[in-house]
Image (cartoon, helix red, strand yellow):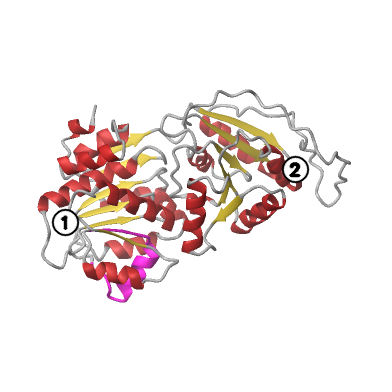
């Protein structure tokens, strides 16, 4: 199937050609016709499946076919998403897809001054991509109106629940017309999200891509059992391997991310952290440096990592294993994209052993254990541990030869 088969208008097809899109992904194949037909949609899909284009392309077409709505350009489509990075990523994609139309798109996110966003809204916007917090601020100040919304998108709804945004989302939806088209995307379906789906969607088309229990076959997974105090040493040791071209390292906390970056800096390894305590400008600069290769290692928390969309990411490293098994699947799914292979490495300390067992149950396979490394788990508490003398230059462990994929 090609994008021509999806009956997209010439201006969108021209933009897709410039973006080097050749064939739709499964979620795009199934979603685009349904959205163009005016149906509500429930999409169950994890990161990396192409869901942004699945909802953005038909929205652009629907709004373009209806033309401009007066000189004031009322907002006709709202895309709600949990994080600034994801909102800005979607904004970038929508602008690329709609470059040959007359539509205007504005991103509304926190962490930066709202003055420029106010000016953009005053000029008129057909599509707004927003995080719930900043959008609520503007609604409370009567600086934005949602009474003309025709298509609402809730993207990564489960993450909005995790971040405590669901009540804000409900307040935002209450300010929209009840007669509208709603597109709902969530990687997981906890009970509160399932309840929200029933209240928002009318006879939806359901599209389910890559169940959360399955992982991308091209991703080579491994786990290192290591004491908590030696995780930083092990990370530095592994990053001496120059075949690790780019690595996204996940930590459990913001402060943990900063500690890891400081440790890598001492070892002369270029790294930056991205998390909620960073300003939006700092986060965008760090993300830009990572994408263009200036920074080799990005250290992130799960929430901040939403919106990091890099086709050629070679490695994902779980410095801390997540306590929610499905999160592991989402994390490692950030590598092995766009037909490339990928490598996922996990560190597991004693307290994380139950998390490892749960993850293996979800993915229905044992993650290969790497035993030949210089920091094996002893299980001795840090308070009484006696560090054995080590050579100042420990010999790197033997890595299996890997076939590099042309990227």
Seen at 18% across and 56% down, the residue is 150
Residue 30 position in % (x across, y down): 26, 34
Give the vertical position of 172 relative to 242 (above or below).
below
Please tell me whether residue 183 belongs to the stretch shown in magenta: no
- At label 1, counting other C-alpha atoms closer than 10 Å, the crowd grade (few under 14, some 14-19, many 20 or more) is few
Residue 179, numbered label: 1
State the image quarter where residue 152 is shown: bottom left
Question: Relative to the observer, which residue lies in front, 273 or 360?
Answer: 273
Q: Please report the bounds of the magenta region as a residue range.
A: 127-145
Please tell me whether residue 139 belongs to the stretch shown in magenta: yes
- At label 2, counting other C-alpha atoms closer than 10 Å, the crowd grade (few under 14, some 14-19, many 20 or more) is many
Left or right relative to 390: residue 195: left
Task: Give how far apart the Cα atoms at labels 2 and 1 are.
Answer: 56 Å
Q: Earlier in the sequence, mark 2 or mark 1?
A: 1
Give the vertical position of 117 relative to 264 (above or below).
below
Residue 83 visible (yes or no) = no
Seen at 75% across and 44% down, the residue is 230
Question: Relative to the observer, which residue lies in front, 112 or 218?
Answer: 112
Seen at 15% across and 36% down, the residue is 7
Q: Which residue is mark 2?
A: 227
Seen at 45% across and 50% down, the residue is 306
State the image quarter where residue 221 is shown: top right
Q: Secondary structure at mark 1?
A: loop
């Amino acid at each position: 199937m090609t994008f021509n088969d999806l009956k997209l208008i010439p201006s969108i097809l021209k933009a897709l050609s410039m973006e080097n899109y050749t064939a739709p992904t499964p979620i795009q194949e199934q979603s685009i016709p349904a959205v163009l037909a005016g149906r509500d949609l429930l999409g169950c899909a994890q990161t990396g499946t192409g869901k942004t284009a699945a909802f953005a392309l038909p929205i652009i077409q629907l709004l373009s076919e209806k033309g401009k709505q007066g000189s004031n350009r009322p907002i006709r489509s709202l895309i709600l998403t949990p994080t600034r990075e994801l909102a800005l990523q979607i904004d970038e994609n929508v602008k690329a897809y709609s470059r040959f139309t007359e539509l205007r798109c504005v991103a509304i996110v926190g962490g930066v001054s709202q003055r420029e966003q106010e000016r953009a809204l005053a000029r008129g916007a057909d599509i707004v991509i927003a995080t719930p917090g900043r959008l609520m601020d503007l609604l409370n100040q009567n600086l934005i109106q949602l009474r003309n919304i025709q298509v609402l998108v809730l993207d990564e709804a489960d993450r909005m629940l995790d971040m405590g945004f669901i009540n804000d989302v409900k307040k935002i939806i209450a300010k929209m017309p009840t007669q509208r088209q709603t597109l709902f995307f969530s990687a997981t379906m906890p009970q509160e999200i399932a309840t929200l789906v029933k209240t928002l969607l009318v006879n939806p088309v359901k599209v389910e891509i890559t169940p959360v229990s399955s992982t991308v076959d091209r991703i080579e997974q491994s786990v290192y059992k290591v004491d908590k105090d030696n995780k930083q040493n092990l990370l530095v040791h592994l990053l001496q391997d120059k075949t690790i071209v780019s690595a996204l390292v996940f930590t459990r906390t913001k402060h943990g991310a900063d500690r890891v970056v400081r440790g890598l800096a001492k070892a002369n390894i270029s790294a930056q952290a991205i998390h909620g305590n960073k300003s939006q400008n700092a986060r965008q600069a760090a993300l830009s440096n990572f994408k263009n290769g200036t920074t080799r290692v990005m250290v992130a928390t799960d929430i901040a990592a939403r919106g990091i969309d890099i086709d050629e990411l070679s490695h994902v490293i779980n410095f801390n294993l997540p306590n929610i098994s499905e999160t592991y699947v989402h994390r490692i799914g950030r590598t092995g994209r766009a037909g490339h292979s990928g490598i996922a490495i996990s560190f597991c300390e004693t307290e994380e052993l139950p998390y490892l067992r749960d993850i293996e149950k979800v993915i229905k396979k044992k993650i290969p254990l790497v035993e030949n490394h210089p920091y094996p788990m002893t299980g001795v508490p840090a308070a009484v541990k006696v560090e054995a003398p080590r050579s100042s230059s420990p010999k790197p462990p033997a890595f299996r030869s890997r076939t590099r994929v042309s990227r």
